Image (cartoon, rainbow, N blue to C red):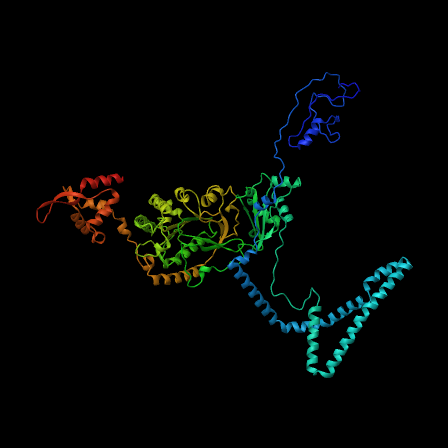
Amino acid sequence: MTTTADHTPEPVNNPEVISVNADPSVREHQALNTEPARKDGRAVNGNVVEFRPGTTNATDVVHAEIVDEPAKTTTQVDPVPHKPSWWETVGDATARPLVASWLLSAEEFKSRAAFLVRYAGHTTAFHALRVPVYVPAALLKAPGALVRHGARLRNWVFDAESKPVRMDARERKDFKEYMALREARNDTVRKRMGPVMLAVIVLAALVYLAVMFVAPFWNWAAMLVTLCLVGWFGAPKDKPVAGRAVDSAKAPRLTSAMIEDALGALGIAGINQAIAKGRGIAFPSPIMRDGPGWRADIDLPPGVTAGDVIDRRERLSSGLRRQLGCVWPEGDASVHEGRLVLWVGDKDMSTTKQAPWPLAKPGATVDLFKPQPFGTDQRGRWVPITLMFSSGAIGAIPRMGKTVALRELLLIAALDPRAVLYAYDLKGTGDLSPLAAVAHGYGVGDDPEDIETAVVELRQLRDELRRRAKVIRNLPEDVCPDNKVTPALASNKELGLAPIVIGVDECQVWFEHGEYGDELREICTDLVKRGPALGITLLLATQRPDAKAIPTDISANLSIRYCLKVMGQTENDMVLGTSQYKNGVRATTFAWSDKGIGYLRGEGSDAQITRSVYQDGPTAKRIVAGARKQREALGNITGYAAGESVDVEAARVDTLADTLSVFGKGEQKLWSDVIVARLAELRPGTYGKWTPANLATALKPDGVKPKQVWATDPETGKGSNRNGYTRDSLSTAQGNRK
């Protein structure tokens, strides 16, 4: 360090470390500060100096030459503080509802009103039946109540509460304070004694007048009523006259402290560090009442995602001291990955009584082109689903309600009298048997003949798909502007475009079948890709949701997805869609007790927790019986429901092979009418009514078309050209099959 002429020390040329995140004025102050720092590296007068190895402490005197070095400059990296205007704050704010949500929901309003009526009726009946017990109990409690209230009145009049203070002054021999307190007490007694004595005189006068001028019956009645009222209202609080008509356990109020404690108990490092540093958990909006529970929007600490909390749902419910079925954490990726929406219900969702299904009412009908109630969310509100223009999948481990959910969807379809139903119970337990009374196609089990029947019906559906495509293509634009089936077109019987709904339980049996698996997979893929626009809906349910159970080409085109409890991420995303597990939609968090509860994704909507409606077998049969009456009135009882059976034998027939077999030795060409006649002799039950046009249609899929061939009529002996087939063309087509 050098000195100037006035012996003022100049600082050593040792640069200081200046924070780039500090305020510019602070950085300037740090840069210009020349006060020395202590050897321990602590601040002197509030300035922080960093000491590095090989540098000289500011307090040591050093003889050295001053070397001018270029001044270090810093760059402002943080944005300039900006306070948002009132307009910006209000513009980004979320408006809270004007009225309670239950006032805007007709179903919820009716439910609450019905509950109040039931509650009032039950309470009135409960106490009315116990009046004979209440009256004697109240009379017996009346003397004790009179004694207690008399003692309270005496203590109040004579200011008993001030006695300990007066006695304390007397014990301390503080004569002046004692006399002041005594005088104040006497004044209080005089003020209270007057009204009480007046009341006693008035009461005595009323009793005297009643005895003198009122009949004894009414005097005794008034005395009994008075004693009953005294006994009723004067009974001890822990021993009331009347019992409770309803036992209710009120759920505790959800608070931010409870949530922070519960989140801190999850063992998530990011949350624990934030709490330890006093940052806590952020709540962007107040915790509010939402239906039969509480909703809290939570911003988790940086680096913590909603999925981290959702995976620990059981521990979260333990931290909140609530049942697992009451705690439902969800992510809100539309805000950011750290936004958690926590809904805590008053009661366990799986045990809460569900509102009656509106479609279970006698005479109920539906329009499949409109949303229909499928289940309820955590708040008890109905969650709708639209079956038309979509296909869907249901996945879950066994015994979680997968088949019941599929049956409910088919019941919805059955209540549209126009719809054509196909129900296949490949599990073989008969869970879909109630629908047999209205199903055009019905199968139960996975025996070879059952699979073969389903294959025949699926082939017919594929042909129907192609026919519908031609019908839609040929309709005028003003009748069908969007090239898809509409409610009006579906109601037109002449077009044959009624909705078709196919439900398959344990669909993996089809797709993994050794002989027909590839064909069934190909047909179902075509149905889910082209069927929705043509009024055909395919619903698949499986207890093993993977790429084999639901092939990727099929799952990629499903718009309705309902996933109950599954065991892993792969199964979760197979049903709900790619990256749903990463986004916090995790059906793996459902408990074994959460039967019938799953994540539902409708037509492009976000997944939401939904509890499907449970309809047992007898109830389902009653609903189907009503649906059958509506179909009978419309004339829409067909197929299996009408007693018609599928001609599997005809489906087994190989027309190409049979056609080749009717060629005689040495015959290379035959007319079509000759072939049809010989086929009728070969299989009368199958080809008895066939024409050359039927033969052409049957051979068309093999690429064989009729053409002009020269042959001789065996009856007349004359030769001519007619439509027919050659042995070579038929043999070539048969070879191409292999």
Does residue 430 appear in this view? Answer: no
Residue 171 location (% of width, % of height):
89, 58
The part of the image, by quadrant, that contains residue 626 is bottom left
Single out the residue that lies furthest toward the left: 717
635 lies left or right of 608: left
Q: Which quarter of the figure is the C terminus placed in?
A: top left
* Residue drawn where x is 70% and y is 68% of the image: 235
* Residue drawn where x is 70% and y is 72% of the image: 140
Does residue 703 appear in this view? Answer: yes
Q: Which quarter of the figure is the N terminus placed in?
A: top right
99 lies left or right of 8: left
Q: Count the marks: how many?
A: 0
Camera-nearest residue between 454 and 487:
487
* Residue drawn where x is 51% and y is 59% of the image: 106
Q: Is residue 439 above or below residue 146?
A: above
Q: Is residue 163 above or below residue 612?
A: below
Residue 163 location (% of width, % of height):
84, 62
The part of the image, by quadrant, that contains residue 113 is bottom right
Q: Is residue 430 above or below residue 151?
A: above
Camera-nearest residue between 596 and 307:
307
Residue 398 location (% of width, % of height):
46, 50
Residue 209 location (% of width, % of height):
74, 81
450 lies left or right of 26: left
Q: Is residue 648 above or below residue 193?
A: above
